[in-house]
Amino acid sequence: MRSNRLFIMLLLLAVISGCGGGGGSGGSTPRKLVSITINPASPSIAAGTVQQFSATGTFSDSTTQDLTAAATWTSSNSQVAAINVTGRATTITTGTTTISASWGGISGTTPLIVTSATLVSLAIQPTNPSIAVGTTQQFSVNGTFSDNTIQDLTTLATWSSSNTSVATVSNTSGSTGRASTVAAGTTTITATVPATLPITGNISGSTILTVAGSGSSQANVLPITVNGSLCSSGSYPNKPCVSVTVCTPGTSTCQVITDILLDTGSYGLRIFKQALNVSLPQVTAASGSLTECVQFGDGSSDWGPVQMAGVILGNEPAIQVPIQVIDSTFGTRSRTCQNADVSPAAAGFNGILGVGLLPQDCGALCVSSANNGIYSACTGTSCSGTIVPLSSQVQNPVALLPQDNNGVLVQLPSVPLGGLTSLNGSLVLGIGTQPNNTLASVTVYPTNSVGEFTTTFNGVTNNSSFIDSGSNGLFFTSNLLPSCPAPNTGFYCPSATTSFAATNTGAFGSPIGTVPFQIGNLNSLIITGNNVFADIGGNGIGGFDWGLPFFFGRNVFIGIKGANSILGSGPFWAY
């Protein structure tokens, strides 16, 4: 299921103006800011280092908002520490200063104590990681000082890679310490503090980064780029892309296709006819060519024939799998597909790789029922509903792999408030089948037979919630957030970034876990020049749609229905 607001995002790229006009409805009491809390409270750090503060506002209706970016920040003694407009304090000399954050006539304060402690050692995290070519690794570095305090020095350090032909590492604001892989091999990643710090000797820290390429133990890894090199130019925000190799079955005639939307909310591979250069044989139905209409939550649909393809995911063995070739001109579209996507340009991608919880896109319903608006048999231009055996339905290709076939792991780094231009991550095939897809520290949330579990938010329980990388925001119903002005009314535009929490529950009553999240002003975000945001949200219909922002900073497992793994039997989400 793609985002129920996916294509509205395409309109945003042409919208230059921000929110304007539009008054609120009458009859309600406006909420008022009551207090501002600054975190961390009363920190003690060494001279020459920095401290990032955050400001949280509490309102008269008991809601909270992140006011870090909106507040006015001041330091009572700028000779001890200065603070910029984002709440980042730079210490200068020993002493104490009061840090203040003000907004809407309300202020919050906290003391900042600057000590004469000297730096003793640096430690880089993670230690000796191994990642795939085409992905990134975010490093951080903590400094231990002579007073036994530990500080995050990631943004103060100068980062270097001993072998830039294997990986480079960024010193650019917003991506400091992020390594980008180039080729297979090893390199030493080093962090060195600037000379202005009160160091004892020459202090640096290092770790080994191993980059695995094709033919290695990382054969089950597909690089993901969110609005990066695997996506088409001008893509809508929060678009996760992978590449797949499609071959004429039984031959070496193959084509690598990029700009494929990674979608954990649907099932099967779908590629636009315009993006295909290889010949694929048609899958037949009882009375003609098998054709499918698949509908998505955003109101769009894809129509086209089902054809047999040789598909290669990462460096896994090729598999023979029925896929949908998206072609709105094939036969006569069914009534359910009158609004079918006509081209990659119109849809915003070359295709969709659905790696959700189910092994087929329809299952038993289409085995027994011909008139459900999904599968048709076409003879010439005449098409009519038909039943379809499981083996002929569009298949989740992961389920057909010889080994790494019980699910997937999606890994994406965290995204700061304000966003990034692009982001790299990994789609790891299999669960517990390789060292790179075995993690113990996750909680498993079983789903019902169609991949849904329960989310409770703002006192409302949604039993049809799901986790969907193909949705570019978090979509849910809330009377706490204002909608954006037209034409983006499906998204939220609060005056300041707002913090929330929801509770997820497995489909059968357990486990139960809290998920914090934030929603920002869409119109303010999209004019920054960034493309990847953790705080995009909009109005949803029905269940809670945990879209792509949910994946940032998490390891998310998707267990395929009927398949066993170290995390249990699917279907389940685990994170």
Image: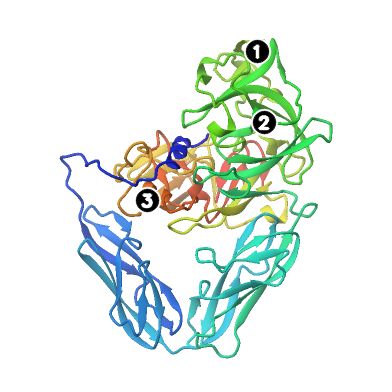
The x, y position of residue 488, in whole percent, is: 37, 38
Could you say where residue 174 lies in the image, as x and y percent from the top left?
50, 63
Q: Vertically, is 338 above or below 25? A: above
Circle 3: element type: helix
Is 286 displayed left or right of 147 in the figure? Answer: right
Q: Nearer the viewer, mark 3 or mark 2?
A: 3
Residue picked out by circle 1: 378
The residue lying at 73 percent from left, 52 percent from top is: 434
| Element at label 1 | strand
Q: Earlier in the sequence, mark 1 or mark 3?
A: 1
Q: In the displayed structure, does residue 226 sit left or right of residue 549?
A: right
* Discs 2/1, front: 1
- Quadrant hosting residue 162: bottom right
| Between discs 3 and 2, the one toward the N terminus | 2
* Left or right: 472 in relation to 86: right
Cα distance between the residues tagged 2 and 1: 20 Å
Q: Which one is earlier in the sequence, the residue at label 2 or at label 1?
A: 1
Near mark 3 (Cα within 10 A), the count class, few <14, some 14-19 or many ≥20, is some
Amino acid, disc 2: Gln
Residue 511 seen from this side: no
- Is 72 above or below relative to 265? below
* Mark 1 residue crowding within 10 angstroms, few (<14) / some (14–19) / many (20+): many
Residue type highlighted by circle 1: Cys
Where residue 438 sits in the image (x, y, percent)? 66, 54
SS for callout 2: loop
Residue that mark 3 sits on = 524
Q: CA distance from mark 3 to mark 2?
A: 40 Å
* Residue at x-position 58% and y-position 79%: 122
Vertical placement of residue 470 versus 380, above or below: below
Q: Amino acid at mark 3?
A: Ser
Q: Which residue is mark 2?
A: 395
Q: Position of residue 65 (x, y in %)?
A: 32, 56
